[in-house]
Image (spheres, rainbow, N blue to C red):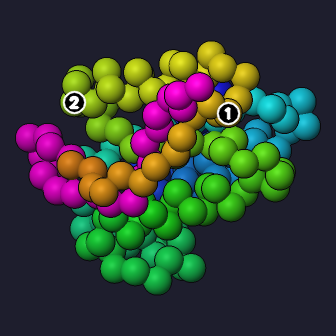
Amino acid sequence: MIFTVSLSEYTQLCYEDDCTNRALESVKLFSEIVNIPELQGVSFVLLFGKADVLPYVTKRVSFKSVFPSYTGSDENCSAIVTFLKDLYLSKYKGSETNKILPMIINSLDTKQVEEAMKIIVPITLAKSTKGYIFKMWDKFDVQTPFFRGKITMFYDVEIKAH
């Protein structure tokens, strides 16, 4: 299962009621879905998008105004992304390890999308993430016409040799 999160949605309200913050609603929805008993044994890809937009929205709206428990700087996009990743992962209450694979993507970068799909498709077709090795990325380059920078502390996956 793929659950997508827009990194810039903390500045927006839900279309349905025009008063609920989209980011808070997304965290709540993920918490409900990832803990459904019938989905035990199903792997999740937690796909964070719009990394290229995040530096611009943090200049307009403080991240702390929506997530007061965030203690970092609004200018530190890497810390914001890590905070959100940890927040989402903390919502899983089960005991399965490697159930959720967090990834970050700039969907404007077609090469990055292709590389992400090479990882996502096999995982979503498999019954679980067993057989995959999770490793930390040293750095993540975001290269768009709007933003150039590095986001650290995300994961990659390799197929485990048998």
Q: Amino acid at mark 2?
A: Asp
Q: Earlier in the sequence, mark 1 or mark 2?
A: 2
Tag 1 secondary structure: loop
- Decide which of 130, 147 is in the foreground and name it: 130
Residue 128 image point, x, y percent: 70, 29
Query: Residue beneath label 2, please?
Result: 109
| Image position, residue 143 (x, y; %) | 14, 43
Q: Quadrant of residue 123?
A: top right
Decide which of 150, 119 is in the foreground and name it: 119
Q: Residue at x 29, y 72 (%)?
A: 76
Point out the image quarter for the C terminus: top right
- The magenta span reads 142-162
Residue lying at 22% horizontally and 25% vertically, measured from the top left: 111
Residue that numbered label 1 is attached to? 130
Depth check, front residue: 108 or 60: 108
User: Where does the N terminus fall, quadrant-wise?
Assistant: top right
**Magenta span has 55?**
no
Work out which residue is located at the far front of the displayed protein and give it: 162
Q: Amino acid at mark 1?
A: Lys
* Distance from Cα at disc 1 to Cα at disc 2: 29 Å
Q: Residues within 10 Å of mark 2 (few under 14, many from 20)?
A: few
- Choose top left, top right, bottom left or bottom right for residue 119: top left
